[in-house]
Image (cartoon, rainbow, N blue to C red):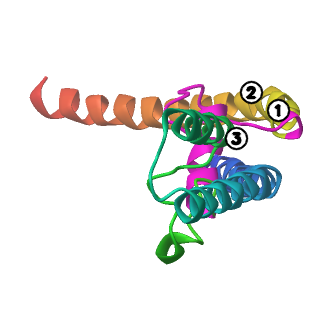
Amino acid sequence: MRSTTLLALLALVLLYLVSGALVFRALEQPYEQQAQRELGEVREKFLRLHPCVTDQDLGLFIKEVADALGGGANPDINSTSHSNYSVWDLGSAFFFSGTIITTIGYGNAALRTDAGRLFCIFYALVGIPLFGILLAGVGDRLGSSLRRGIGHIEAIFL
């Protein structure tokens, strides 16, 4: 594979990763932010209405927190100073996109929406082969360079 072809393929993979990150963020971030807002509202209401916690009140609060956690909210970050925090910022979404096309699957970000899950299937169907072609091209290029290097070493010592 020629260098220009390899660079074009690398640029295509990077463009594919960025576009995937933008779509994943657009699909998942609003859902996460809504869950985060709802958790904040429940927490404020609970603390305002219940200065002395009873078992029944605590049970209700725990249920609401569990529902919010299922929606992707993080109760440790749910405060006014972190109101713009998102698991689905562009950097995290880019990382997630990379774990999809490389089939690494690492991380604690998980898709929560049906639209995000459906997009992920089609994103992987195109992205995995695309990344495989890039990897094959890089491997071919490295193999050629290594063969030339070994040839030079053999010429010197043999």
| Residue 108 within the magenta-colored segment of the rendering | yes
The residue that appears at 48% across and 76% down in the rendered structure is 81
Q: Is mark 3 on a helix, strand or loop?
A: loop
| Residue 138 within the magenta-colored segment of the rendering | no
Between 123 and 70, the one lying in front of the other is 70
Sequence order check: which comes first, mark 1 or mark 3? 3
Dot 2 and dot 3 residues touching (CB under 8 Å): no
Question: Which of labels 1 and 3 is toward the front?
Answer: 3
Report the side of 53 relative to 61 (left or right). Answer: left
Between 4 and 104, the one lying in front of the other is 104
- Estimate the spatial distance between the alpha carbons at disc 2 and disc 3, rounded to whole Å: 31 Å
Kind of residue at badge 1:
Val
Kind of residue at badge 3:
Gly
Quadrant in which the N terminus appears: top right
Question: Which of labels 2 and 3 is toward the front?
Answer: 3
The residue that appears at 74% across and 27% down in the rendered structure is 129
Query: Where is residue 92 drawn, in percent x and y?
Result: 56, 53
Residue indicated by mark 3:
71
- Estimate the spatial distance between the alpha carbons at disc 1 and disc 3, rounded to whole Å: 28 Å
Quadrant in which the C terminus appears: top left
In the picture, the disc for residue 93 is none
Q: What element carries label 1?
A: helix
User: What span is colored magenta in the figure?
Assistant: 90-115
Between 137 and 63, the one lying in front of the other is 63
**Other-residue count near label 2 (Cα within 10 Å), few / some / many at <14 / 14–19 / ≥20:** few
Dot 1 and dot 3 residues touching (CB under 8 Å): no
Residue indicated by mark 1:
126
Query: Where is residue 24 drawn, in percent x and y?
Result: 76, 49
In the picture, the disc for residue 129 is 2
